[in-house]
Amino acid sequence: VEVDDYCQTSVPTISAVGDLIPTLQLAHVGFAEGILVAERLAGLAVTPVDYDGVPRVTYSSPEVASVGLTRKVAEERGYEVVEATYDLAGNGKARILGTAGAVTVLAAKDGPVIGVHMVGDRVGELIAEAQLITNWEALPSEVAALIHPHPTMSEAVGEAHLALAGKPLHSHS
């Protein structure tokens, strides 16, 4: 079903969300679209869903999670991209869990984080922090200054930002 940015069809009294429209086919996206429509119908000020800012998780073993832009899309949109990848081999909790994987952070050169991509067990639990980082347009140096608890998988997000900010702590090649 074709809709505008506010999930309204060409018929003013009919809206469509979720699996009916060609957006990300994720439950949390359909939920957000439903809230958007309900608030619009209630006369509230609404903002369209920012699909680039939606966290995406593939629940597999290992999990795959991402938010924001890929390098290809970022470059197509005119960004000069810098990136850092942190190998989970340097993460204490990943070692305890026996998982392998990586966290890759993309940023606009001299600018904010524009994408975070992860592979590894339990990375779906880390994507909410990455969503805040990308949607609030945090700089890698701002995230690098945050203290992540040890030993946790969330340290991998911090470590990737430390590397991108030029301050790598535990790096593995």
Image: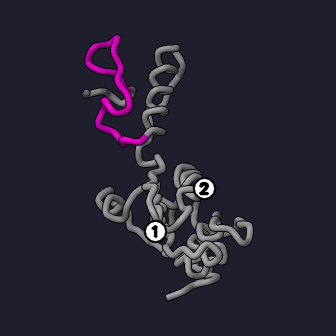
Q: Is residue 53 visible?
A: yes
- In the foreground, 108 or 133: 133
Q: Secondary structure at mark 1?
A: loop
**Circle 1 Cα neighbour tier, 10 Å, few/some/many (<14 / 14–19 / ≥20):** few
The Cα atoms of the two marked residues, 1 and 2, are separated by 21 Å
Q: Amino acid at mark 2?
A: Glu
Query: Where is mark 1, residue-wise?
Result: 109
Q: Is residue 20 magenta?
A: yes
On the image, the x and y values in percent for residue 13 come to 35, 11
- In the foreground, 34 or 46: 34
Q: Which quadrant of the rendered structure holds the N terminus?
A: top left
Q: Is residue 117 visible?
A: no
The residue range painted magenta reads 7-26
Q: Secondary structure at mark 2?
A: helix
Q: Is residue 53 left or right of residue 11?
A: right
20 above or below 42?
A: below
Name the residue located 63 percent from the left edge and 67 percent from the top edge. Answer: 153
130 above or below 15?
A: below
**Circle 2 Cα neighbour tier, 10 Å, few/some/many (<14 / 14–19 / ≥20):** some
The prevailing secondary structure element of the residues shown in magenta is loop
- In the rendered structure, find residue 130 and report the number of the disc placed on it: none
Which label lies toward us, 1 or 2? 2
Query: Where is mark 2, residue-wise?
Result: 129
On the image, the x and y values in percent for residue 88 come to 55, 76
96 above or below 70?
A: below
Q: Amino acid at mark 1?
A: Lys
